[in-house]
Image: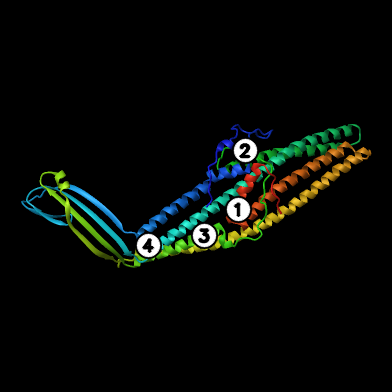
C-alpha cells in the first residue's frame, strides 16, 4: 500500500482574486510534486477508496468472530410479589415458592460456541478476505487513476501557458507586419490586398490569443478539481513536465493490473457469497452453557444482591434446522448466484479494458513521439529560414517584412515543439501506467520530486 504523507497547503497557496483576461494570473508556481501530493490527500476518489478499505477490514474482523465462542453476563434486581396466598416461579433457573413478596437478584453467565453452520462461517471469512483484496487493489487503482488525471490536467495547463505566452509575442510581430505592410502600400510597393491579408492575420492571432486564454482558465479549474481543491483558478504551473527515466522493457501480465485484481477478488467474494446463502439449507450445531446465581431477601434489595450465590448450571448441544419454508433460502441463493454472474462479467470486462488501455497508451506514445520529431524538424527549418532571410537582407535581396514573417513562423514552430514535448511526457506516463501499474505511482512521484529539487529532467527513449 502506498503511504500517503501529509502535505501542507501553505506551500501552494495562491491568490484569490479572479484572473485578468489580458495578462497571465499571478501567484507562486505549483510544481508537479506539490500537485500530486495534494491530490493524494484531497482527491475524493482516493478518500472513497480508503473508506472502502477500512470498511472491508472491519468486515474481515467481524467474519473472524464467527469462529470464536461468545460469552455474555447479565444481572437483574427485581421485587417479586405474588397475587395469591402462595405462588411459585422460576428465577435464574431455580424454582422459588413464597407466601409473600421478596427482592431477588438473578445473575447469569452464558456461553455459546458454534460448531457447524453449513459452512457459512468459512465462506463468509473467505468472502471478507477477498473483499479486503478487492478494496486494497481498488485503492491502488484509484491512486493511479487520480495521479494520471492530475498529470493530464497539469500538462494541459502547461501547454496553455506556452501557447498564451507565444500568442502575445506573435500578436506583437503581426502588428509590426501590419505597420510595415501599410508603409509599403503607401510607397506603392504593396497592394491593398496585401494590407488586408496582414490585418486579417493580425486579427486571427488576437482571436487565437483570446481563445487560448479562455482555454487556460478552463484547464486551470480542471486541474484544481483533479487535485481536490476546486476554486483555485489562479494556479500557475511549470511549463515543463518530467518524463519517466526509462520506459518499461516489458509489460506486466494483464492479470496483475490493479483493476483486474480487484475485479477478480470481487468475483471470488461473490462466489463465496453463494456458499453463504446455500448454508441456509443445512442445520446448525452449537454448544451452549449457562451458569445461574440467585440471591433472595424479603426486605432489602441490597441484601439480596450481596447474598447472591450460585444456584445451577446447564450444558448442552443445540441443533437447529429450518425445514419449511425454504423460499427465503432459495431466493438468497438465486440472488447471490446472480451477483456472482455479474461479478464474473465484470472480471472479464476489466481484462478487456486493461488490454485496450495498454494498446491505446502504446499508440498514443508512438504518435506523440512522431509528433515531437516532426516538431523538432520544423524548428530546425524555421531557424534556417530566419538565418537565410537575414542573409538575403544583408545582400539587399529581401525586406524586413520577410524577416518578421519568418520570426512569426519560428515562434509557431517553437510553440508546437514545446507542446509536443509536453504531450510526449504525458503519453510516456500513460504508457508506464498501462504496462507497469504497480510501480506507476512510485515512479511518478519520484520523478516529480527529482524535478522539484532542481536537477535536469532524465532522458527518455
Q: In this rendering, does residue 276 appear at all? A: no
- Say what secondary structure mark 3 lies in: helix
Q: Is residue 235 left or right of residue 114?
A: right
- Say what secondary structure mark 2 lies in: loop
- Residue wearing tag 4: 121
Q: Is residue 157 above or below residue 186?
A: below
x 59%, y 41%: residue:
224
- Residue wearing tag 2: 235
Are there few (<14), some (14-19), or many (20+) residues within 10 Å of tag 2?
A: many
x 71%, y 41%: residue:
162
- Chain-order first, disc 3 or disc 1: 3
- Residue wearing tag 3: 263
- Chain-order first, disc 4 or disc 1: 4
Q: CA distance from mark 3 to mark 1?
A: 19 Å
Q: CA distance from mark 1 to mark 2?
A: 25 Å
Farthest left residue in view = 85
- Say what secondary structure mark 1 lies in: helix
- Say what secondary structure mark 4 lies in: helix
Are there few (<14), some (14-19), or many (20+) residues within 10 Å of tag 1?
A: many
- Chain-order first, disc 4 or disc 2: 4
**Which color scheme does this rendered protein use?**
rainbow
Residue 275 location, quadrant: bottom left
Q: In this rendering, does residue 95 appear at all? A: yes
- Seen from the viewer's position, the closer of residues 163 and 214 is 163
Amino acid at each position: 500500500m502506498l503511504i500517503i504523507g501529509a502535505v501542507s497547503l501553505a506551500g501552494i497557496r495562491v491568490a484569490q482574486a479572479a484572473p485578468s483576461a489580458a495578462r497571465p494570473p499571478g501567484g507562486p508556481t505549483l510544481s508537479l510534486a506539490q500537485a500530486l501530493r495534494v491530490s493524494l490527500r484531497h482527491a475524493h476518489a482516493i478518500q472513497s477508496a480508503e473508506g472502502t478499505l477500512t470498511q472491508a477490514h472491519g468486515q474481515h474482523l467481524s467474519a473472524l468472530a464467527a469462529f470464536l465462542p461468545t460469552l455474555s453476563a447479565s444481572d437483574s434486581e427485581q421485587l417479586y410479589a405474588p397475587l395469591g396466598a402462595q405462588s411459585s416461579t422460576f428465577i435464574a433457573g431455580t424454582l422459588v415458592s413464597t407466601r409473600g413478596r421478596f427482592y431477588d437478584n438473578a445473575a447469569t453467565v452464558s456461553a455459546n460456541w458454534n460448531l457447524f453452520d453449513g459452512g457459512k462461517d468459512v465462506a463468509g471469512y473467505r468472502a471478507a478476505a477477498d473483499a479486503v483484496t478487492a478494496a486494497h487493489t481498488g485503492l491502488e487503482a484509484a491512486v493511479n487513476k487520480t495521479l494520471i488525471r492530475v498529470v493530464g490536467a497539469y500538462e494541459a495547463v502547461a501547454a496553455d501557458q506556452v501557447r498564451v505566452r507565444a500568442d502575445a509575442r506573435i500578436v506583437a510581430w503581426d502588428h509590426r507586419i501590419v505597420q510595415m505592410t501599410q508603409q509599403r502600400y503607401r510607397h506603392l510597393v504593396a497592394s491593398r490586398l496585401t494590407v488586408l491579408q496582414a490585418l486579417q492575420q493580425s486579427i486571427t492571432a488576437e482571436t487565437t490569443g483570446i481563445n487560448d486564454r479562455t482555454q487556460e482558465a478552463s484547464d486551470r479549474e480542471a486541474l484544481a478539481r483533479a487535485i481536490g481543491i476546486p476554486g483555485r483558478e489562479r494556479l500557475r504551473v511549470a511549463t515543463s513536465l518530467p518524463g519517466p527515466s526509462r520506459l518499461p522493457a516489458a509489460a506486466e501480465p494483464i492479470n496483475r493490473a490493479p483493476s483486474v485484481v480487484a475485479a477478480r477478488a470481487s468475483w471470488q467474494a461473490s462466489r463465496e457469497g453463494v456458499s453463504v446463502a446455500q448454508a441456509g439449507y443445512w442445520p446448525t450445531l452449537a454448544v451452549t452453557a449457562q451458569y445461574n446465581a440467585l440471591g433472595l431477601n424479603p426486605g432489602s434489595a441490597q441484601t439480596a444482591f450481596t447474598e447472591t450465590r450460585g444456584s445451577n448450571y446447564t450444558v448442552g448441544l443445540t441443533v437447529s434446522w429450518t425445514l419449511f419454508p425454504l423460499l427465503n433460502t432459495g431466493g438468497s441463493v438465486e440472488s447471490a448466484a446472480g451477483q456472482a454472474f455479474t461479478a464474473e462479467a465484470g472480471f472479464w470486462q476489466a481484462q478487456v479494458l486493461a488490454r485496450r488501455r495498454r494498446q491505446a497508451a502504446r499508440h498514443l506514445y508512438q504518435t506523440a513521439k512522431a509528433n515531437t520529431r516532426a516538431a523538432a524538424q520544423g524548428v530546425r527549418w524555421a531557424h534556417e529560414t530566419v538565418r537565410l532571410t537575414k542573409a538575403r537582407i544583408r545582400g539587399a535581396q529581401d525586406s524586413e517584412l520577410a524577416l518578421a514573417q519568418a520570426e512569426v513562423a519560428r515562434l509557431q514552430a517553437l510553440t508546437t515543439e514545446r507542446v509536443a514535448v509536453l504531450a510526449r511526457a504525458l503519453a510516456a506516463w500513460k504508457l508506464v501506467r498501462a504496462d507497469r501499474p504497480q510501480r506507476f505511482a512510485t515512479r511518478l512521484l519520484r520523478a516529480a520530486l527529482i524535478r522539484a529539487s532542481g536537477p535536469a529532467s532524465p532522458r527518455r527513449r
